């Protein structure tokens, strides 16, 4: 077989056009799927916005956490505007809670003590 006959049977590139039907099907699928996802996301956020206060009301019946007063409850989407500043603020609150005396429930006689003092008391008791 000579080189010209071999070159004619295998030119080194695609000799046929792309099939239109699969490309059209993908285009139609994307044209329907993408707006459906967008609308579904909007509906999801509306549903979550409706149920979020109900969830927070159910959680308020449970025993409150000692740091519940420091928690920020928002009705909108929870987004960090300035993460470094918010982290520093949280660390300051945690430092205050862990290093100071305060009443948890004055009527029941429950007080919060610094963590170092609590460790000393526990270590002395053993």
Image (cartoon, helix red, strand yellow):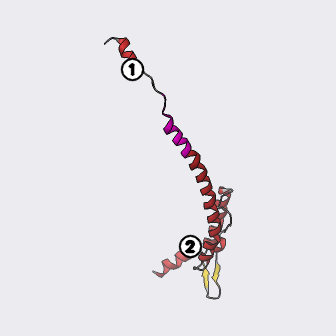
Q: Position of residue 85 (x, y in %)?
A: 68, 58
Q: Does 106 appear above or below 12?
A: below
Q: Secondary structure beneath disc 1?
A: loop
Q: Which mark is residue 10?
A: 1
The one nearer the camera, 48 or 26, is: 26
Which of pointers 2 and 1 indicates the residue nearer the eye? 1
Quadrant of image for the N terminus: top left
Q: Indicate the quadrant where residue 52 lies.
A: bottom right
Q: Does 3 appear above or below 83?
A: above
Q: How crowded is mark 1: few (under 14 residues within 10 Å), some or many (20 or more)?
A: few
The residue at the far left in this view is 1
Q: Residue 116 carries which label?
A: 2
C-alpha separation, residue under disc 2 versus residue under disc 1:
82 Å
Q: How many marks?
A: 2
The one nearer the camera, 23 or 6, is: 23
Residue beneath the point at 62% across and 69% down: 51
Q: Does 100 appear above or below 86?
A: below
Residue beneath the point at 62% across and 55% down: 39
Q: Position of residue 6 (x, y in %)?
A: 36, 16
The one nearer the camera, 56 or 73, is: 56
Q: Are marks 2 and 1 in contact (CB under 8 Å)?
A: no
Q: Where is residue 100 in the image (x, y as percent from the top left)?
A: 64, 74
Q: Can residue 67 be seen in this view?
A: no
Q: Position of residue 20 (x, y in %)?
A: 51, 35
Residue beneath the point at 42% across and 21% down: 12
Q: Does 2 appear above or below 87?
A: above
Q: Secondary structure beneath disc 2?
A: helix
Q: How crowded is mark 2: few (under 14 residues within 10 Å), some or many (20 or more)?
A: few
Magenta extent: 17-29
Q: Which of marks 2 and 1 is nearer the N terminus?
A: 1
């Amino acid at each position: 077989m000579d080189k010209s006959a071999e070159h004619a049977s295998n030119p080194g590139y695609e000799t046929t056009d792309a099939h239109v039907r699969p490309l059209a099907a993908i285009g139609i699928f994307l044209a329907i799927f993408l707006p459906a996802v967008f609308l579904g996301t909007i509906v999801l956020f509306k549903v979550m916005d409706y149920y979020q206060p109900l969830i927070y009301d159910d959680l308020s019946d449970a025993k409150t956490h000692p740091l519940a007063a420091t928690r920020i409850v928002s009705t909108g989407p929870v987004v960090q505007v300035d993460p470094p500043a918010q982290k520093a603020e949280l660390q300051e609150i945690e430092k205050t809670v862990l290093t100071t005396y305060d009443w948890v429930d004055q009527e029941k006689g429950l007080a919060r003590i610094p963590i170092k003092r609590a460790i000393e008391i526990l270590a002395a008791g053993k």
